[in-house]
Image (spheres, grey):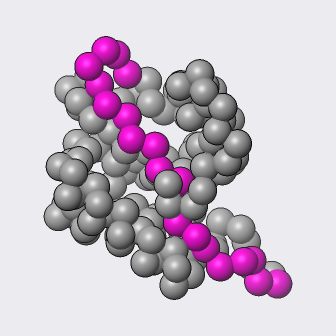
Amino acid sequence: MSDGKTLYLVRHAEAFWMKAGQRDFDRPLNDRGKHDAAEMGQKLKATGIQPEIIISSPALRATQTAEIIVRKLGLSTDSILFNENIYEAETADLLKIVKSVKECHASTMLIGHNPSMTWLINHLTGQHVANAPTCS
């Protein structure tokens, strides 16, 4: 994204632990995760944050986080774009996704997973964040 653009990075909210035979990709949010995602959406709305584009991992816990936040922002869940390359991404993968956002979008929200989101935060800010907590 070029100068004057805003990027919001969100790690998905807390999910249930994986059950026997369940794929990691299919883990849903737990009750705390649902609560935290709703609270995050309300806080974002209260501060006037309204991303023009939301790009999310298609993993269930990220999808649910995105849907809850978008509803709290008063947007349609149809506004969420899903990109399978966010799941298990390296920093370079996430940077490629961010750079692919059309110039007409002034603000983008990327919803993904750790450790990828922490790595991207560290890369973009030059700071050291040990771990981006869930729904941060």
Is residue 57 visible in the rendered structure shown here? no
Residue 91 vs residue 128, the one in the foreground = 128
Instruction: Tell me what residue is drawn at x 34 percent, y 48 percent.
Output: 54
Quarter of the N terminus within the rendering: top left
Q: In this view, does 12 lie above or below 47?
A: below
Q: In this view, does 55 lie above or below 97?
A: below
Count of labels in the image? 0
- Can residue 73 be found in the magenta stretch? no
Is residue 11 visible in the rendered structure shown here? yes
Region in magenta: 1-20
The residue most toward the top is 3
Q: Is the magenta stretch mostly helix, strand or loop?
A: loop
Instruction: Tell me what residue is drawn at x 50 percent, y 60 percent.
Output: 135
- Can residue 6 be found in the magenta stretch? yes
Q: Is residue 94 above or below residue 64?
A: above
x and y percentages locating residue 7 in the rendered image: 37, 34
- The image quarter in which residue 86 lies: top right
x and y percentages locating residue 26 in the rendered image: 63, 72
In this rendering, position of residue 118 left or right of residue 73: right
The residue most toward the right is 20
x and y percentages locating residue 50 in the rendered image: 21, 48
In this rendering, position of residue 82 left or right of residue 26: left
Instruction: Tell me what residue is drawn at x 60 percent, y 56 percent.
Output: 133
- The image quarter in which residue 76 lies: bottom left
x and y percentages locating residue 71 in the rendered image: 25, 68
Residue 131 vs residue 25, the one in the foreground = 131
